[in-house]
Image: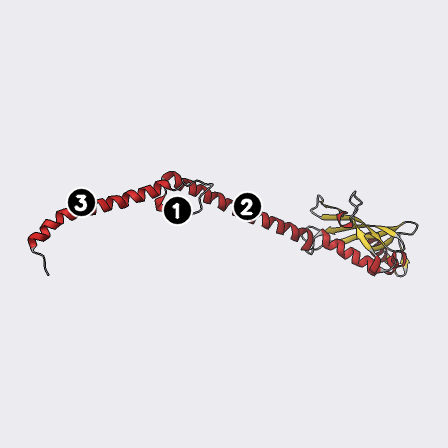
Amino acid sequence: MKLPFRSLRATLPRLQPLVARNAYATQHGSQNTASKRRAVTPFNDNGHVPWKELSAVEKASRATQQTFNFGLVIVGVVLTGGVGYFLYQDVFSPDSKTAYFSRAVDRIKKDPDCLALLGDSKEITAHGDETMNKWRRARPIASTLKTDARGDQHLMMHFYVEGPLNNGVVNMHLTKRAGHEDFEYKYLFVDIKGHSRIYLENADAQASGQERKKIKLFGASFN
């Protein structure tokens, strides 16, 4: 059934105030909801409030929080990288002090003269200087790394070995000449009380021997 045109025109004016009231109620409700939420600060922002609903101050607060969080991530990455670099240089690198210490201990455990005075290689242990801590792992290895006027690097190390028969003191000196990649032994020896020094490496003695060979001519030695 169709309403007469006059009846429709008479109904429209009565509907307009109702629509206006509903629109006002909706807008007023949204404003109440926005006014009831907590103000966003750098300390309570959880990201749930959309960016477009933030005030200028709240936007600045969120930007500050995100900048701070990003800074923490950067600091964490830098610290992690620094620790990793330190571990590699001091422990895992083939040129680390720990690597040269381990190689020296292995050589001592394989040397017949050392084994004759220290005892079974399986029972030989090595450690650094004595400290107040009773745990052997807390005994640091004394070492120094210096560069001389010519640019040559000198790595010197001092530690102790203990065996079932005797104890000994180990001294080691390695050099890396400028422009070279590898360290070379200058000396590596073990001192055991009451016995002669045991040299595993002695570059000075080798150099002296080579010089003596050079000045020997036709079976005669010249000093």
How far is disc 2 from disc 3 in space, using C-alphas? Answer: 61 Å
Which residue lies under the disc numbered 1?
49
Which residue lies under the disc numbered 3?
17
Amino acid type assigned to the residue bearing label 1 in the image? Val
How crowded is the residue under tag 2: few (<14 C-alpha within 10 Å), some, or many (20+)? few
Callout 1 secondary element: loop
- Would residue 4 be seen by someone viewing this image from the given angle? yes
Percent position of residue 19, x then y: 20, 47
Marks 3/1 in contact by CB < 8 Å: the verdict is no
How far is disc 3 from disc 1 in space, using C-alphas? Answer: 33 Å
Percent position of residue 78, x then y: 56, 48
Marks 2/3 in contact by CB < 8 Å: the verdict is no
Which residue lies under the disc numbered 2?
75
Q: Earlier in the sequence, mark 3 or mark 1?
A: 3
How crowded is the residue under tag 1: few (<14 C-alpha within 10 Å), some, or many (20+)? few
Amino acid type assigned to the residue bearing label 3 in the image? Pro
| Foreground of the two, 222 or 36 | 36
Identify the image quadrant of residue 36. top left
Callout 2 secondary element: helix
Q: Left or right: where does residue 45 sit relative to residue 106?
A: left
